[in-house]
Image (cartoon, rainbow, N blue to C red):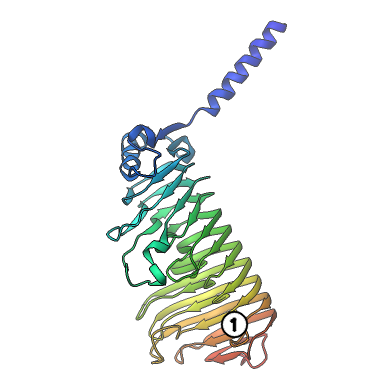
Amino acid sequence: MLSFFFVGISLLLGLQVQKALAFIECSVLDYGAVADNSTDLGPALTAAWQECVIPQVTTTVATDVLLYVPAGNYLLASTVTFDGAENWNLHIAGDIYLPFNPDLTGTMLTFENCENILLNGPGAIYGNGYRYRPDGDLTLYPNRPRLIRFQTCNNCEITEVYLYDAPMFHVTIIGDNNVAHDMAIIASHIGETDGFDMSGNNNYVHDVSVENGDECVTVKTPTNGFVAERITCKWTAGCNIGSFGSGATGVDVQNVYYSDVTISNSDAGVMIKSYPNCQGTVKNVTYTGFTLDAAAYPIYISAFWEGGTDDTGTLEISDVTFDNFVGTGTPTRPAVLLDCNKATPCEDIIFTDISLTDTTADTFTNACGTGLSGLDAC
């Protein structure tokens, strides 16, 4: 009986070990990578993906096949595109560094036409962006590289990878049912350092922190269904919708929900921003549970964010709710600024429990709603 017990335990442990080792690991070290912060990691990533990952993906469980960057310091000197990627995990345990190369352009890691990709850490990517912006000059290298892009990708996830100071923009996700969570972005306090730029349907960002000088977590067109929760933004330009670019037609953003957001020392709190000649729809947007500390323009909707004052647009902005905003703005700017197209005034803009101090008087142009003194009823 006792021998049967030990045999049973041995079989059980054997099954557990087998289960624990069930994934397939494709290490970049087996395909030419060297953790010396000198050898370009790009070719090894491509080779490991093509020669090891693709042939061995047989399930729809992303963690069954790992493209693995082990602990160590790596140089990523060339862009990598995973086109048609599906059902695998890019697991970065090491630290990846970008060089300063004035001729380096594009996006360093691109997933294109992809499905069910997991990109995770605990590693980091260091963009060395300050080297591409000497003395804060954003014009010297206008085509400098971006860090990560999911282009036409669905059901993907990025988490627990830490991003530092991209030369331009950190994470762009375009597609449906994607999630970014439990990660941090830290960059210089300067423009063109966007944290998360999101578009598509039913995307979700939660439990992230962003420190930069531009967008924190922002929605682009087209979007139908977006949720952002438990977001921390420092020195950013806020959590925004837009901008949509001069002359944009067919703008379509709806069913957006931000909750539990902390914003400090920032150029804005929340913005819906456009040019005065845009067309389309922004509707059913909720911002709730915001804590602001020295946020210029705490609440800002403007069809004239850039592009002059020639009011030729027909952007319809409606059903926007601002709820439970507390904290401080800045003493030279209004707590609430609404400035909409004359042909299509902003409608049903709802304010509840707004308690913002250290600001100037609210300003409303071509807008109606409820909850604030001086705002016309619709």
Q: Does 14 sit above or below residue 340?
A: above
- Most foreground residue, 27 or 8: 27
Classify mark 1: helix, strand or loop.
Answer: strand
Q: Which residue is mark 1?
A: 349
User: Which residue is nearer to you in this view: 213 or 238?
Assistant: 213
Answer left or right for 280 relative to 121. Answer: left
Instruction: Give residue 318's position: percent from left, percent from top.
Output: 53, 80
Mark 1 burial class by Cα count in 10 Å: few <14, some 14-19, many 20+: many
Pinpoint residue 15: horizontal percent, then vertical percent.
57, 21
Residue drawn 53% across the image and 70% down it: 236
Which amino acid type corresponds to the residue marked 1 in the rendered image?
Ile
Quarter of the image with the N terminus in it: top right
**Is residue 164 depicted above or below 123 in this figure?**
below
Q: Quadrant of the C terminus?
A: bottom right
Q: Is residue 362 visible?
A: yes
Q: Is 126 located above or below residue 279 in the figure? A: above
